[in-house]
């Protein structure tokens, strides 16, 4: 029976980090850690068997790394995708880009404050996604410089999106949640969600983070602007 709390699987190969993160999240009234595992294979298995609301993954783990696990948990080929939040000590490197391309919903450094980690879990569970504020511009700038625009996103934004959809993508690229976008555009949150459900397939992306990156790649928003 559902408890109404956000059900989370934690995956980290370091016992102390795994225990600390599990305890920290478990102290939140609205979060329940349903499994704490030591590698990517166990994370994939737990996601399939327990159907949590969020899987928190480290990137570097034995047997199966976090990126490979993320592809199986939240990627395009996942039968029943579960949102993934990456928690890692590594910031700007190919691991991050691989995680974004795998379709993860959020990315946060392990040195974040406990409240920020809990809020990130809530944001990912609600479908908003999250990325550490200190990383956003660096991540996007580096990703855009390393990755050419994919063929599926090569057309101009005006040819792919309606005016309202374009507005939503711009606000999404600023890091706004669905609720914040709805307030900015004076519409219902459900309307924003409906638009996003149409926008992502148009852009050939699978997550809000990838849509934000698309906006930078295609010149809707300037890095550092």
Image (cartoon, rainbow, N blue to C red):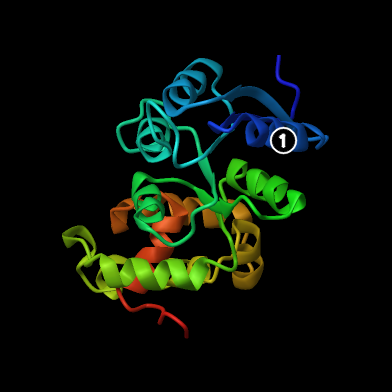
The residue where tag 1 is placed is 20
Q: Is residue 219 left or right of residue 115?
A: left
Number of callouts: 1
Crowd class of label 1 (few under 14; some 14 to 19; many from 20; radius 10 Å): few
Vertical comparison of 63 with 122: above or below? above
Comparing 34 with 214, the one in front is: 34
User: For residue 1, what is the image quadrant?
Assistant: top right
Asked whether 129 or 164 is in front, the reply is 129
Which residue is more in the foreground, 71 or 162? 71
Disc 1 element: helix
* Residue 41 versus residue 152 in the image, above or below: above
Residue 126 screen position, x and y as percent: 62, 44
What residue sits 56% from the left and 18% below the top? 50
The answer to whether 53 appears left or right of 169 in the picture is right
The residue at the far left in this view is 151
Residue at horizontal 52 percent and vertical 70 percent from the top: 171
Report whether residue 172 is seen: yes
């Amino acid at each position: 029976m559902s408890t109404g709390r956000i059900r989370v699987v934690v995956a980290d190969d370091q016992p102390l980090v795994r225990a600390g993160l599990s305890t920290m999240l478990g102290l939140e009234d609205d979060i329940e850690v349903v499994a704490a595992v030591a590698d990517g294979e166990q994370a994939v298995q737990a996601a399939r068997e327990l159907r949590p609301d969020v899987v928190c993954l480290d990137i570097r783990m034995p047997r199966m790394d976090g990126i490979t696990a993320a592809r199986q948990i939240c990627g395009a080929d996942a039968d029943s995708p579960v949102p993934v939040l990456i928690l890692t000590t590594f910031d700007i490197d190919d691991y991050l880009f691989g995680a974004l391309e795998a379709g993860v919903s959020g990315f946060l450094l392990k040195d974040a404050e406990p409240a920020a980690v809990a809020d990130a879990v809530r944001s990912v569970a609600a479908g908003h996604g999250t990325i550490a504020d200190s990383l956003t511009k660096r991540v996007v700038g580096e990703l855009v410089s390393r990755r050419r625009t994919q063929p599926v996103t090569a057309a101009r934004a005006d040819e792919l999106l309606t005016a309202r959809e374009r507005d939503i993508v711009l606000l999404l690229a600023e890091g706004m949640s669905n609720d914040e976008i709805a307030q900015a555009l004076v519409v219902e949150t459900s309307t924003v969600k409906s638009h996003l459900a149409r926008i992502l397939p148009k852009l050939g992306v699978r997550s809000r983070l990838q849509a934000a990156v698309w906006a930078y790649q295609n010149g809707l928003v300037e890095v550092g602007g």
